[in-house]
Amino acid sequence: MTGCFSDPCCKHARFVLLLSVYSQRMEKVVIGLSGGVDSSVAAYLLKQQGYDVTALFMINWHDRTGTLTGQCTWEDDALIAEMVAKKLDMPFHIVDLSKDYKQRVVDYMFDEYSKGRTPNPDVLCNREIKFDIFLNECLKLGADYVATGHYCRKSSFAHDGKTIHQLLAGTDPNKDQSYFLCQLNQDQLSKSLFPVGGLLKPEVRRIAAEQQLPTATRKDSQGICFVGKVDLPSFLQQQLQARTGNVIEIPADFAEKKKNVEKIPDNFKKLCFAYPYKPWNGKVIGEHRGAHFYTIGQRKGLSIGGHADPLFVVGTDVKRNIIYVGEGTEHPALYRPGLFIPTPEIHWIRTDLAMKDGETRHYEVRIRYRQPLEKTTLYQRKEGLYMIFDQEQRGITAGQFAAWYDGEELLGSGVII
RNA sequence: GACUCAGUAGCUCAGCAGGUAGAGCACAUCCCUUUUAAGGAUGGGGUCCUGGGUUCGAAUCCCAGCUGAGUCA
């Protein structure tokens, strides 16, 4: 390139390039500033890269009921976000999306719990709010792109005259948040930028400190995004009634016997679904406050002692209002060889790679945020996608998303049934 | 009715050749973590069934009572 510029014959090209730089307006990016370090540093980096950057803070939740005391309010976050924007010399706006957030995330959450499933509201928040409603707000402001502080990367390439976007894991293996974006589509991805995805968390902290951003030492946010850290049972009790029911212990040998199924396609039904425990499969050992407050793999909150090893929830039945438990970390009922995603729930980010009926492929799968990837065989059938893990997975939970990766690329995802 | 065994933290139990108590589970707090869980660390908890007695001293020995389980009739 440099050589070309010094070459007299390229003078024309050079002129055209310069012209285009000055005549073309700077690309405009709206960054979702949350008041945390990650989005602050993302904003700074965008500015460094020469974008015309505007900060937009979104309010998604006003209600504080159920929120743990000592947590920050959105007012605190907005104030700090504004300080960051000021420091970086960029326009700052606030948008209130709480009505949409309630309808599209919180209502979904309650609905799922009422069905005895365990939703992932943050995956929905990204699909429905940040990269939909919020994205549209950004476009209204004239943005070419929307940026967030997520730890993930995007890559694009041309294929058959079309641009294909890839969602890649964040470089920091400890912070990778690609999973939370597992429900995005090509259109959403095409307008997204993830400026901190190639950095390690300590580097982000360092940049924030060097730039003296007000968020440099701010603690990372946790809990349901926007709602904050809540005590879930009491949060859920706003809408879900407490109803005492029986806790039934499933003996390990019973579960072991039921799991003795060969890993062949004929047995998909048995391999990929939760075993439907019945009250007579074990004995009553206590009471709970409502089956919909518990989730698979849960240990805390049972309030049942007297066992040599801890008790874990291995199944819930909201209709009968029963929760099934097993004793010991390695209880066989805690492990399952596979899972199933019904056809309507299958989502490919890489639509060009979608599997066809009858097809079989090998990918790596993650069944919840921060779970290690597990080598898995995927079988596409008319009714859905059957997945069989090389190693049995612990605590497969309906309502959570299974996301399949090819190396560092997240190809698709779907809700576990 | 007689006999045997048991009655120790919220639960299941250990301690019992006498010197004022431990473990696991449960629970709480903190750490980790933008879901839910899990995981890690720390911690709070006991009239040792009741009443007598022996002893310098009893959860530990003796007696009586109460409660529970079982055996025999």
Image (cartoon, coloured by chain):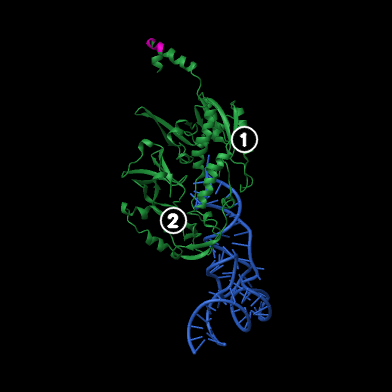
Chain colours: A green, B blue
- According to the picture, the residue beneath numbered tag 1 turns out to be A78
Task: First in sequence, mark 1 or 2: give its number.
Answer: 1
- According to the picture, the residue beneath numbered tag 2 turns out to be A334
Front one among A205 and A280: A280
Find residue A79 and report its image quarter: top right
Find residue A95 and report its image quarter: top right
Q: Inspect the magenta stretch and tell me whether residue A11 lies in it.
A: yes
Residue A219 vs A246, above or below: the answer is above
**What residue sits 48% from the left and 34% below the top?**
A197
Front one among A82 and A269: A269
Q: Inspect the magenta stretch and tell me whether residue A109 lies in it.
A: no
Q: Which residues are magenta?
A: A8-12
In the picture, measured across the screen, residue B27 lies left or right of residue A314, that is right
Viewer can see residue A163: yes
Q: Chain of mark 1?
A: A
Residue A269 vs A228, above or below: the answer is below
The image shows residue A151 at horizontal and vertical percentages of 49, 37
